[in-house]
Image (tube, rainbow, N blue to C red):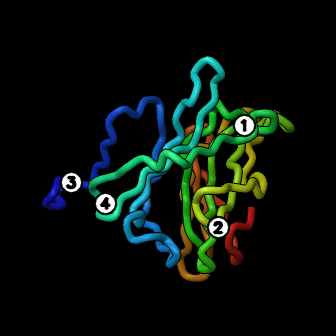
Amino acid sequence: DEDGNSTNVVIDGLDDSSLCVFYDTNPACPANQRYKVLSMMFRDRKLDIRTLWCYASGDGYHFKKDRSFGFTLDDSIYTAGSARDPKVVCDADGIYHMFVTTTDRRIDRGVLVHLTSPDCEGWQVVGNIAESPDRAEPECPDYFVCGNTYYLIYSLHGRAHYRYSDNPFDG
């Protein structure tokens, strides 16, 4: 609510989506877009394709959809219909990193795909940062640093898994 008594984000009209809500720490980000919600939503249910949409806000309460923004994974490589659970972080150099749950068709396994962007709009695939031993898809990723160690955590087969590294974004 307006008094800050609630921490829920409600966006009317979202169906079958997964959200990533974050405060954009990139110095180049305009003040009226500091709070962001990225959502993987079905663009076309018949084609089974999900598209990443962006909503932005300057106050963290009132969000507007960025109608010029839309990103879909290459469905010839990744299963765009299963793409979900975006996690976005901004590194010290102002580069955005996103992890998305999906399946890599080339290896027929569930993966967390790692993407980067200089502006949180144009995304490039870096590669798979985590791969399942089977077709199950790693879900609900989180990424953070504690001390000098970088952690990627996610769920697979209903169990928590984690990776850690002394270097950021190592797989």
Question: At x 69% / y 67%, what residue is drawn?
Answer: 169
Residue carrying label 1: 103
Q: Describe the element under mark 3 as helix, strand or loop.
A: loop
Precedes in sequence: disc 4 or disc 1:
4
Question: At x 58% / y 51%, what residue is drawn?
Answer: 154
Q: Describe the element under mark 1 as helix, strand or loop.
A: strand
Q: How many marks?
A: 4
Would residue 85 be visible to someone looking at this image?
Answer: yes
Inter-mark Cα distance, 4 to 3: 12 Å
Residue carrying label 3: 6
Q: Decide: few, some or many residues near mark 2? Use Cα within 10 Å; few <14, some 14-19, many ≥20.
A: some
- Label 2 sits on what residue type? Pro
Would residue 159 be visible to someone looking at this image?
Answer: no
Residue carrying label 2: 118
Q: Decide: few, some or many residues near mark 1? Use Cα within 10 Å; few <14, some 14-19, many ≥20.
A: many
Inter-mark Cα distance, 1 to 3: 35 Å
Of 75 and 58, nearer the camera is 58
Precedes in sequence: disc 2 or disc 1:
1
Q: Position of residue 33 (x, y in %)?
A: 42, 63
Q: Are marks 1 and 3 in contact (CB under 8 Å)?
A: no
Precedes in sequence: disc 2 or disc 4:
4
Q: Are marks 4 and 3 in contact (CB under 8 Å)?
A: no
Question: At x 65% / y 21%, what residue is drawn?
Answer: 47
Q: Position of residue 133 (x, y in %)?
A: 77, 41
Inter-mark Cα distance, 3 to 2: 32 Å
